[in-house]
Amino acid sequence: MLRLMFAFGLVFSGVDGPALSAGQSAAAPDHYLFVWAGDRAQKGNDFLAVIDANPDSASYGRLVTTLATDQQTMRVHHTEYTMPASGMLFANDHDAGRTFIFDVRNPLHPKIATSFTDMAGYMHPHSYLRLPDGNVLATFQHAHHGESAGQMGKTGGLVEINDQGKVVRSASNADPAFAGALLMPYSLVVIPKLDRVVSTDSSMHDEDIFSGVTYQVWRLSDLKLLKTAYFDVGENRYAHISPEEPRLGPDGSIFVQTLGCGLERITDVGTSEPRSRLVFTFPGNWCGVPTIVGHYLVQSVPQIHGFIVLDITNAAKPVEVSRLKMSDVYQPHWTAWDPKTLRLVVTSGHTPEDRLYLLKLDQATGALTVDDAFRDADGKIGFSFAEREWPHGWKGVGAPHGAVFSR
């Protein structure tokens, strides 16, 4: 149930009131935070919230507008991790198996360009990474099996999709050498200079979350699956379990966060024998989405109710350099970096008091601090998704998950 709680995002104490109009700001905002959210009660619909993310704006931290979809909330989940150059943003309701492509080129008036569900025989996409040509490469957790189109199996695939929501190519991640393994693609990293893609295998289903222990290496040019391999097992025997988010490190190796709060490092992906080593273990479990900024890796760690920053200059031996505790109850999950304002957005999903925050990262020391200038209409630090009248005409408690800054 914890994974379900994280996936549905935040519940907050309250702010009422409409979004700011342009005339209420001394300086019109020109930088935005897009937050993918749904109805906490799962009675209303998924929506995209646009928040002023310009630190020089008088309305910094305030809601600008929202855009509702026609999808009743099931489990609002991932967006892309960074804003694509095209301004066409992918976001999914995972349990609905539906992805929306938002046109956010005009942030004050975002539009739904299209949406899609199953593609090329695969269902339930999870993560989206951009390719050099601008197309998206997405992980789909399941392939259709048997005569029942809705039957979900233990393998899935990768699908390349353009901004019009059309399939370009696809490939199965089934591996006969791992016939009994759980091979549900979770997330991925693209390495064009090596002609490689690395994906992780981890399930979004509670009954399977302790079964994922593998990663896969693909050739980018033709999506040929080259290798399926097990992650390194550490001393505690669980830190490698449920590998989720891979990130490309400054040295070219790949760091993978696991739900067991391990940090695996994959090397030699350009060879026939890639290797994985568990290089760090964070406290507890249920660790969420990491972000690499320069030679620092920022990890959300629910056990400490905050974040731990590692210096990964020596990639084989990361060193903890700072911690930030948000409260005694905060359960962090999503993180994403804004290179324009040098801030990190973080979301949580545990108590009514949790809010969305922006953090500052000292790139000389790795220290994290809360940006106390980013405030909602209630005057408190952070943005609240508590019950309010939202601009799209709905009143309720929002449940955010993915969040990404404008370019």
Image (cartoon, rainbow, N blue to C red):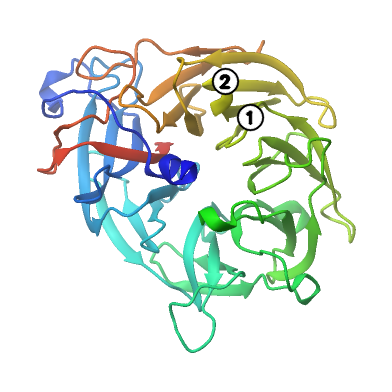
Q: Quadrant of residue 362?
A: top right
Which of the pair 289/33 is nearer the observer? 289
Classify 10 Å Cα crowding around label 1: few (below 14), some (14-19), many (20 and above): some
Q: Which mark is residue 304?
A: 2
In the picture, measured across the screen, residue 166 lies left or right of residue 136, that is: left
Q: Quadrant of residue 174?
A: bottom right
Residue drawn 21% across the image and 46% down it? 67
Above or below: residue 145 compared with residue 228? below
Callout 1 amino acid: Gly
Q: Residue furthest bottom?
A: 147
Residue 246 point in image, percent of width and height: 66, 45
- Determine crowd level at label 2: few under 14, some 14-19, many 20+ residues with C-alpha closer than 10 A: many
Drawn side of residue 172 relative to residue 65, left or right? right
Kind of residue indicated by mark 2: Ile
Q: CA distance from mark 2 to mark 1?
A: 8 Å
Q: Position of residue 112 (x, y in %)?
A: 26, 56
User: In the rendered image, which residue does mark 1 sit on?
Assistant: 284
- The answer to whether residue 380 of the structure is visible from this angle is yes
Disc 2, disc 1: CB below 8 Å?
yes
Instruction: Note whether residue 253 is visible.
Output: no
